[in-house]
Image (tube, rainbow, N blue to C red):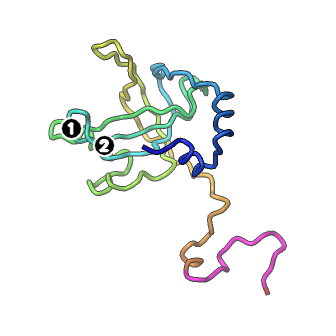
C-alpha cells in the first residue's frame, strides 16, 4: 500500500496543503434518487459490462441537462439504463440501441458520439430492502448538440502531424512570410 504523501506529491499537493484543504472542505451530501419525471439528458457513455449475477449488458449513462418543468437543480446528475444482452431481452435492447445509431454489435465496443440529446422518462423503483433507485422507463433521441469546440485543438490534426503547420489556428494579426 502506498503512502498518502507519495501519491499527493504526484497530484500536486504538498502534505501541509492537503491537510489544510481537508480541514476547510465540507463533505458532500448524499444524493437521493432523482424525482420521477421527464428529463432532457445527454447520452454520455455506453459500456459493455456484466451484472452482479453475470448477465451481459450494455450500460448506458445519461447526464441530466434539465429536469421536469425546466428544473435545473438536477443538472449534471446521472442516471443509468441497463440493456441486457440475453435472448429474451435482446428485442428491447436492440430497440434502444438502434435509437443511438448502434445498428451492429461491433458498435457497442466504440464510444458513443458526443452530444446525443434525449428525452428520458425516469421512474422510482423500491428494492425489497426498501432502497429507492431510479429506473429509466424509456428514452428518445430528440437532437444532436454540437460540442463546444476545443480552443486548443488544431483544426487539422492530420496535416499538423505530417508537419504542415499551415492548418494551425493563427492569432489575429499574425502572418508568416
Q: Nearer the viewer, mark 1 or mark 2?
A: 1
Q: Is residue 103 magenta?
A: no
Location of the N terminus by quadrant is top left
Q: Residues within 10 Å of mark 1 (few under 14, many from 20)?
A: few
Tell me the tag on residue 58.
Answer: 2
Secondary structure character of the magenta stretch overall: loop
Q: Examine the rendered structure and indicate whether residue 168 appears above or below residue 119.
A: below
Q: Are marks 1 and 2 in contact (CB under 8 Å)?
A: no
Q: Residues within 10 Å of mark 2 (few under 14, many from 20)?
A: many
Q: Label 1's element?
A: loop
Q: Which residues are magenta?
A: 162-176
Residue 132 vs residue 83: left or right? right
- The image quadrant of residue 70 is top right
**Residue at 37% across, 56% down:** 110
Residue 154 vs residue 138: left or right? right
**Residue at 63% across, 58% down:** 150
Residue 144 x %, y %? 51, 48
Identify which residue, 168 or 142, lies in the foreground: 168
Tell me the tag on residue 55.
Answer: 1
**Residue at 51% across, 21% down:** 30
Residue 66 vs residue 104: left or right? right
Distance from label 1 to label 2 (Cα)? 10 Å
Amino acid at each position: 500500500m502506498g503512502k498518502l504523501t507519495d501519491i499527493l506529491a504526484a497530484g500536486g499537493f504538498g502534505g501541509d496543503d492537503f491537510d489544510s484543504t481537508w480541514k476547510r472542505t465540507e463533505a458532500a451530501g448524499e444524493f437521493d434518487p432523482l424525482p420521477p419525471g421527464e428529463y432532457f439528458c445527454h447520452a454520455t457513455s455506453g459500456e459493455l459490462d456484466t451484472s452482479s449475477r453475470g448477465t451481459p449488458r450494455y450500460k448506458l449513462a445519461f447526464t441530466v441537462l434539465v429536469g421536469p418543468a425546466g428544473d435545473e437543480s438536477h443538472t449534471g446528475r446521472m442516471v443509468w439504463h441497463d440493456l441486457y444482452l440475453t435472448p429474451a431481452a435482446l428485442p428491447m435492447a436492440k430497440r434502444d440501441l438502434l435509437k443511438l445509431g448502434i445498428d451492429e454489435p461491433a458498435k457497442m465496443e466504440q464510444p458513443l458520439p458526443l452530444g446525443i440529446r434525449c428525452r428520458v422518462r425516469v421512474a422510482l423503483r423500491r428494492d425489497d430492502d426498501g432502497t429507492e433507485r431510479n429506473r429509466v422507463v424509456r428514452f428518445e433521441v430528440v437532437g444532436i448538440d454540437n460540442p463546444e469546440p476545443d480552443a486548443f485543438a488544431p483544426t487539422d490534426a492530420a496535416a499538423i502531424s505530417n508537419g504542415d503547420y499551415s492548418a494551425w489556428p493563427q492569432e489575429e494579426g499574425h502572418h508568416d512570410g
